[in-house]
Amino acid sequence: MKGPSSQSVDTKSVPTHSLYGHIFIVGKKHVHPLAAWLAIGVVSLFTFTLIIEYGRSQIASGAYIEVISPNGDEYWVRQSPQVVTWNSSGATNVRIDLLRGSNVSSNIVNSVSALAGSYTWNVPKGQVVDSNYSVRITSTAGGVSDSSNATFSIVETLPDELPPSPLPSPDPLLQAPANVIYASKDATLKKPHPNSNTGIAKLMLIKKGGGINRGIVGFSLADMPGADTINKVTLRMYVSSVANIGTGKYVGVYRILEDWTEGNGDFDASIAGTGTGVTWICAIDLDLADGRTNCGNPWNGGKYVSAPTDVFLQISAPTATWNVTSDILNALQSGDTEVSWLITKTPETQDGSARYHTRDGAIYYNNMDFMPQLIIETN
Ligand SMILES: [Ca+2]
Ligand SMILES: [Ca+2]
């Protein structure tokens, strides 16, 4: 933009009453007051720019990266997809390194958008099994960095044989984000072991080979928003591992039509459980401890709607999701207080298996990403 005209002039033409004219004496030359005003403007603009730049540097010095997960005590199984998550401000791209002790074991990714906030890494088959791992996330521009608060483990298989950990406090149910409802119960129904209960098992197994295993998961609707505000509800399970699924197998969710109780058994850990709980044969076996059938009206693998509510092509993605909006709306309209689904391959007779984390595993590993959950989108 063209500025106002001005020019250097002879001293004699400068009015002596002009304060700014006197300030801008250069050598023996005076400057026209208009030029002086312009110079003041330039100096002010410069000062203002300095203030702005100072402000920016203050913001930049407030830049940070915060590792959310893994942040200590997690278990990463070799050859499984694992998700690194973080918060950040003031960083454009970040580099993620896997540390073993204080040494870099491998570079998980060289540069990924800081705003992404998560990155999925497939733990290599040959990754050394150790309990001394952490991740470090660094701005590629340098300056800011953060590491896991404590070490986590890379393992061959999840240590199911470990004793149960104390329940975290506060109850993880209270920690669910506003748009999420965590499962209230889950288990595996094992056809080859039809009186067994797996209510406290850390993993849910879906498979055919060696006998059919079906997952079952239930949710309380106490915290579900009203039907008129719901746009979509997604059931999400977190994958622990898959096997023999080739290019992928469809897994369906089928709405359960009968009440059931979770139980406190863990068959694979040789814990039969006590009191009542779900088995392949019984929705509620009245005595888990005896290894026999104790129910009057066997459901034999679950009483459920024969058509799946939705199907998901299970490959190796870290999460499996199903659109269960219609079931939720129907349940709310019927005044139901709970809703449950059977989870199994469709068709079920194909090979291939998937292990999903259960609520018990999420609590055990203190990783709420693992929680079977309903994700609610409202309008
Ligand atoms: Ca369970
Ligand atoms: Ca029994």
Image (cartoon, helix red, strand yellow):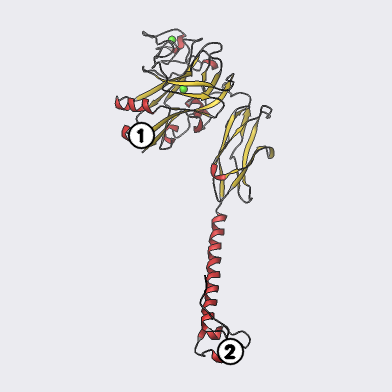
Identify the element where label 1 is drawn.
Answer: strand
Q: Quadrant of ligand 2?
A: top left
Which amino acid type corresponds to the residue marked 1 in the rendered image? Ile
Check whether the beta carbons of the residues at disc 1 and disc 2 lie within 8 A of each other.
Answer: no
The numbered dot on residue 230 is 1
> Is residue 25 left or right of 297 when viewed as pictured?
right
Instruction: Check disc 2 and report the residue beneath it.
Output: 10
Q: Where is 64 relative to 300, above or below? A: below
In this rendering, is residue 269 above or below 178?
above
Q: Secondary structure at mark 2?
A: loop
Q: Is residue 103 left or right of residue 365?
A: right
Point out residue 66 in the picture as x, y percentages from the top left corner. Answer: 56, 44
Q: Can you name the residue that lies furthest to the bottom here?
A: 12
Q: Residue at x 49, y 21 (%)?
A: 251
Q: Position of residue 284 (x, y in %)?
A: 39, 14
Mark 1–mark 2 distance (CA, rounded to whole Å): 79 Å
The residue drawn where x is 58% and y is 44% is 113
Q: How many numbered callouts?
A: 2
Residue 240 is situated, as x and y percent measured from the top left of the image, at 55, 26
107 sits to left or right of 307 = right
Left or right of 339 in this view: 51: right
Can see residue 81? yes
- Location of residue 71 by image quarter: top right
Q: Tell me which numbered mark, 1 or 2, is placed earlier along the sequence.
A: 2
